[in-house]
Image (spheres, helix red, strand yellow):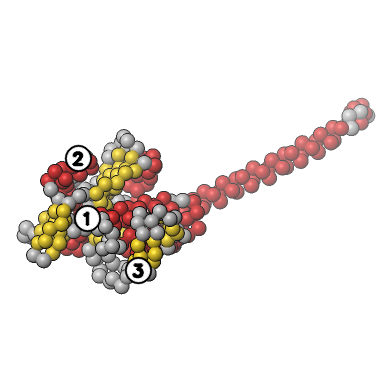
Amino acid sequence: MKDRKQRSNHPHNSRVDTHSYKNRHIWVWVISIVALLAVAGAAYFASVYFRTKSAVDKTYDPKTAVKTTGEFDGKKKFAVLLMGTDTGALDRTEKRGQTDTMILAVVNPAKKHYTLVSIPRDTMAQMVGTDEFGVEKINAAYEIGGARMAMDTVSELINVPVKYYAVVNMGGIMKMIRYVGGINIRPTLSFEYGGYVFKKGKLTHMGGAGALAYSRMRYDDPRGDYGRQERQRQVITTLIRKAVSISSLSNLDSILTSVSNNVRTNLPFSALQQIAMNYRDCAKNSSSDYLHGYNAEVEDATYQIQPTSELQRISDLVR
């Protein structure tokens, strides 16, 4: 009776217990929802990880594999030869093709900076790896001897070791730009090409075919191939920024499929992971340059000839 009276003297106790129970009940639900979201998020990112790894693994070229252990620790500089082949677009169907685009990307973690150095496609160069001494336009190196010859020829030309490469065909570039929803660019000059009209300085939304037309024209550019190289660098850097944005995740599968079918590289997935983690600050600052030369006619073919002083300048810049 005494206990019953004591409880009856404190009628709010039952309300406190009920309120406490409700609070615990709500927190259980909150914690459960958060846990479910965490599991779902982990599952999603695990799915993204494995899908990405699977796609990137298909781009790997074991024939030109080199040791990458300890190379990408965030302290060492490194260079990658980026090449764009003239296959897969505008009715071009060659199996390997020449490289319309050759850009040496140099990453410098000490300066948190990367540099894109364009090498003109008509540059006269010794083809390194042929049985006999041979001089060709440098864009023929990939067609003759694949990525190995292209890297070795560039390395010999500017006296800088080049161990890594990535090559993409033009059809692949068109698809990737389309899958990321197009890119926005301010043209460096006004011109018409391939049915597209570009106005200097006017922010222009370009789909895959438009961006390809913008980056390919050279004969109507007062700067010739040098002007085209600048536009190519512009398209590449804009595409990279757009491709890694969150908005592109909705088309992730299409992007990954395009990458796996149109890109080849000797950088394994583990190396690309390390680059993404250890060199992310370098992506914020960039500069560009190109190998200057002068035109020369050799046996009815037009070449770009670079003086020794210019080759030394670029060699010093890259190093």
Q: Quadrant of residue 112?
A: top left
Sequence order check, earlier mark of 3 and 2 = 3
Where residue 64 appears, x then y in whole percent?
22, 54
The residue labelled by disc 1 is: 120
Report, in whole angstroms, how far the alpha carbon at label 2 lies from the one at label 1.
18 Å
Which amino acid, by three-letter code, is at mark 3? Gly
Q: Is residue 220 above or below residue 38?
A: below
Which amino acid, by three-letter code, is at mark 1? Pro
Q: Residues within 10 Å of mark 3 (few under 14, many from 20)?
A: few
Residue at the image point whose x is 28% and y is 71% from the top: 92
Viewer can see residue 139: yes
The residue labelled by disc 2 is: 316
Report, in whole angstroms, how far the alpha carbon at label 1 lies from the one at label 3.
22 Å
Where residue 289 appears, x then y in whole percent?
26, 47
Residue at the image point whose x is 34% and y is 43% from the top: 286
Between label 3 and label 2, give the one nearer the viewer: 3
Q: Quadrant of the C terminus?
A: top left
- Badge 1 marks a residue whose secondary structure is loop
Q: Is residue 263 left or right of residue 305?
A: right
Residue at the image point whose x is 21% and y is 58% from the top: 121
Residue 120 or 45: which is nearer the viewer? Answer: 120
Q: Is residue 315 left or right of residue 47?
A: left
Disc number for residue 194? 3
Between label 1 and label 3, give the one nearer the viewer: 3
Residue 293 or 162: which is nearer the viewer? Answer: 293
Residue 227 or 229: which is nearer the viewer? Answer: 227
Sequence order check, earlier mark of 1 and 3 = 1
- Badge 3 marks a residue whose secondary structure is loop
Viewer can see residue 50: no
